[in-house]
Amino acid sequence: MERLPLLLTNDDGVNSPGLLNLASALNRLGHPILVIAPLKEQSASGMKLTLRNGMKFQEHKELAKSIKINKDSDLRIFSLDGTPCDCVIVALDGGLNKITPEISPSLCISGINRGPNLSVDIFHSGTVSAAREASLYGLPSICVSLATYSHENYSDSISCTLQIVDTVSRLLPIKPPNLLRPEGSKMKFANKELTSVQNSFLLGDIFLNINVPEVWNGEIQTVNLGARWYQNASDMMSNDLNEVTFHVGAATIIEEEIENTDCVSIKNGYASITPLASWPQSHPLGLSNKLIEEALEYNIKTGLPSWL
């Protein structure tokens, strides 16, 4: 099977081990890899864009050389002094194809993020937002997070990601049919022989949010988002000058025990996959409840979405 060219990004920065270890593993398999990631950490940046300042852009040839294993497969690494969404826009609609004409991505992978992106996290996460941004541009996308801060061993997360990329690759064409959305909201099918959910993924109207637990049991579950609540989410501090500052970061996280949700899957040692709609339901490309339900159907043996 021909290996898909891949766009990799993240919100932890271009030097993060989750990103580089994943890029190296994918390169080993023969995937042409284009990495463009923030120069510095941009965690919890959401879909923030840099509108008023120029962003420094540079290639990291020595970094690429240090992680490259397959000499016959392209691997190029760039950084941008901006946000994850800035990186995706530059990659897809900013002229980067003139610098890297040899790599035209078929799929965007955002991650591997350090820390969970469960439940409400998807609204704040730069990792999730980068995948969503790519999907808005019509590129099929997934995002991956190691759902713990207790270690930085990405081996399980990489194994899980490679399994999912291999499965996704069987569905995707080399050339994304809806890249840059040439027909706006009018393109409804990439391939009329495929199901509605499969077409939605190919067109960028659904993307996948993946979390891998601290200790993975080797199994995957396709699930809904859970209910996760942050309490005491900001601290007020003062100094000798009587200045008041606030620090955001929850002291307590409460997760509800709701079956078939990402929070519970991770707690029980499963990797979770949650299909997410790229657009709000009120948008012309918003997905119906029926289609979301179909996207959540899974293969009992593998736990993967059945439409993959």
Image (cartoon, rainbow, N blue to C red):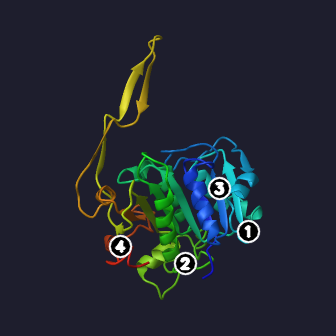
Residue 225 location, quadrant: bottom left
Q: CA distance from mark 1 to mark 4?
A: 34 Å
Question: Mark 4 — residue?
Answer: 303
Q: Is residue 46 above or below residue 281?
A: above
Q: Mark 3 or mark 2, which is nearer the start of the sequence?
A: 3
Q: Secondary structure at mark 1?
A: loop
- Name the N-terminal-most of marks 1 and 3: 3
Front residue of 97 and 5: 5
Among the two numbered marks 1 and 4 on one chain, the one whose residue lies closer to the N terminus: 1
Q: Which residue is mark 2?
A: 172
Q: Are marks 2 and 4 in contact (CB under 8 Å)?
A: no
| Amino acid beneath label 4 | Gly
- The residue drawn where x is 34% and y is 68% is 221
N-terminal of the two: label 1 or label 2? 1
Q: Badges 1 and 4: C-beta atoms under 8 Å apart?
A: no
Visible residue check, residue 9: no
| SS at circle 2 | loop
Mark 2 is on which residue type? Leu
Task: Nearest to the eye among marks 1 and 2: give it.
Answer: 1
Q: Is residue 182 left or right of residue 235?
A: right
Give residue 81's position: percent from left, percent from top: 66, 44
Q: Are marks 3 and 4 in contact (CB under 8 Å)?
A: no
Which residue does the numbered mark 1 point to in the structure image?
71
Three-letter code, disc 1:
Lys
Q: Residues within 10 Å of mark 4 (few under 14, many from 20)?
A: some
Q: Which residue is mark 3?
A: 36
Q: In the visual, does 76 lie left or right of 86?
A: right
